[in-house]
Image (spheres, helix red, strand yellow):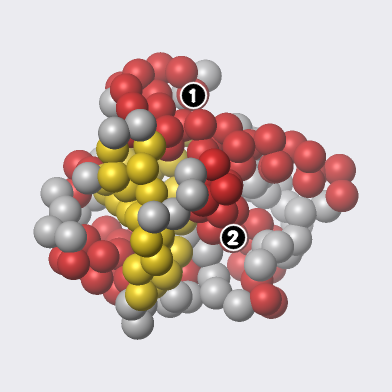
Amino acid sequence: MKIVVGLGNPGLKYRETRHNVGFKVIDELRKRHKPEEVIKSKYFRGWKIKIENFFIILCKPKTFMNESGIAVKGIVERYNLELGNLIVIHDDLDIPLGKIKIGIGKGAGGHKGVISIMEILSSRDFIRVRIGIGGRETETSYINYVLSPFLPHEKKIISTSIKKAADACEMIIKSGVEKAMTEFNR
């Protein structure tokens, strides 16, 4: 079994922000694969789906971004998951808008949600699907930037990248992370 966690902040206030693209990928995967079960927890919302013959748990933390590790630890412990079967999807300021990068074992790059996960799990040995939101050249603070909505001309680009990130997750599940990295890390 694999667990796919999309990072974001809960609540309507944050729904359309750049920081919530991980949640959007989970929504896309739920549209593609009808959930067989809804999983309830104090720290996350989850859905059990099937991709081909693989059971997958999709997860959205109920915690705020900088406490994502609490939710991820809860789901990892609930399913006694090996970290190599954990896929975390999140936004990345260092990647150009709309680009996708897949990696394993890399540093957090300053992302507060990823830092929280790495600290609480005491590991970085999980798969990450990073979605570029641009922003390194922004004149506003990074916090204001990631908590802002996409501009009208960016929405089509990010919509396409959300679908690509869902495709990447499906490929990781079906064919392995190496093949997905070859395909998407261009």
Farthest residue to the right: give it: 152
List x then y, in percent, for residue 55: 29, 44
Does residue 153 lie above or below 60 as drawn?
above
Q: What's the amino acid at mark 2?
A: His
Q: Are marks 1 and 2 in contact (CB under 8 Å)?
A: no
Task: Report x, y in % for residue 116.
Answer: 33, 66
Please give the name of the residue rendered at 16% of the width and 54% of the height, measured from the top-left corner: 81
- Splitting the image into 4 quarters, where does residue 180 fall? top left
Residue type indicated by callout 1: Phe
Residue under the image location 56 percent in, 54 percent down: 27
Along the line of sight, the residue nearer the viewer: 89 or 101: 89
Would residue 79 appear left or right of 45 to someone viewing this image? left
- Give the mark, 1 or 2, whose residue is nearer the N terminus: 2
Q: Which residue is mark 1?
A: 184
The image's mark for residue 19 is 2
- Give the alpha-carbon distance from disc 1 to disc 2, as whole Å: 21 Å
